[in-house]
Image (cartoon, rainbow, N blue to C red):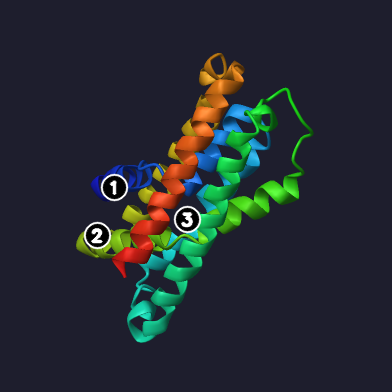
Amino acid sequence: MGEAAVQGWLVAISLIMAIGAQNAFVLRQGLRREHVLAVVLVCAASDAVLIAAGVTGFGLVSARVPWLGEAMRWAGVAFLLVYGGLRFRAAARGGEALRPAGGAAVPLGRVLATCLVLTWANPHVYLDTVVLLGSIAAQYDPHRTAFGIGAGLGSFSFFAALGFGARLLAPVFANPRAWVVLEIVVGVTMWAIAAGLALGG
């Protein structure tokens, strides 16, 4: 049981670690030091729900509803294109809107809404948590629950480290140009993911 939990923790971190819309958003909020705990909790709780769904076999739904995956794919493409465009616009403005000490704070509700959309509208999240983790968990019967718990803890520890550890980069991002670079990188990443989703179908 202990081995299954450790493996779940390691697998979850390896899957989540890749840069994506959700991770970029958590990093950005951590650098701004704005609603970090709430963002970390929302991301981790969302992953926990999806991991639980995968571990309990809910992934079979996608096979029974063929159009669901396609609809999620194009919804994800549209959202990633829009979000990437917003990041390029922020970069064009010189990074002023992203400096931790500059501009008005974004309301908690808006931050959480963006976080939820970035999480639940991203087809990669379902692939990683429901499909991949679900299939791997099946290999650890009768300890798949321990595997799922370990994976959920892995998700929480990763997002906590990313969100609260981002402040260590604060000296670098004291320069608005660093924010411009970050926004461009995030924008390119979002559009690259969108292109991959669109062409991968």
Distance Cα–Cα, label 3 vs label 2? 16 Å
Residue at left offset 50%, top offset 25%: 165
Mark seen at residue 48:
3
Please tell me in which quadrant of the rendered image residue 180 appears: top right
> Which element type, helix, strand or loop, lies under badge 2?
helix
> Which element type, helix, strand or loop, lies under badge 3?
helix
Residues tagged 1 and 2 counted as in contact (Cβ below 8 A): yes
Q: Position of residue 185 (x, y in %)?
A: 45, 36
Q: Is residue 195 visible?
A: yes
Amino acid type of the residue tagged 3 in the rendering: Ala
Amino acid type of the residue tagged 2 in the rendering: Ile
Amino acid type of the residue tagged 1 in the rendering: Val
First in residue order: circle 3 vs circle 1: 1
Residues tagged 3 and 2 counted as in contact (Cβ below 8 A): no
Judging by the rendered image, the residue that carries numbered circle 1 is: 11
Residue at left offset 43%, top offset 38%: 158
Mark seen at residue 152:
none
Judging by the rendered image, the residue that carries numbered circle 2 is: 136
Instruction: Tell me the quarter of the image containing the C terminus.
Output: bottom left
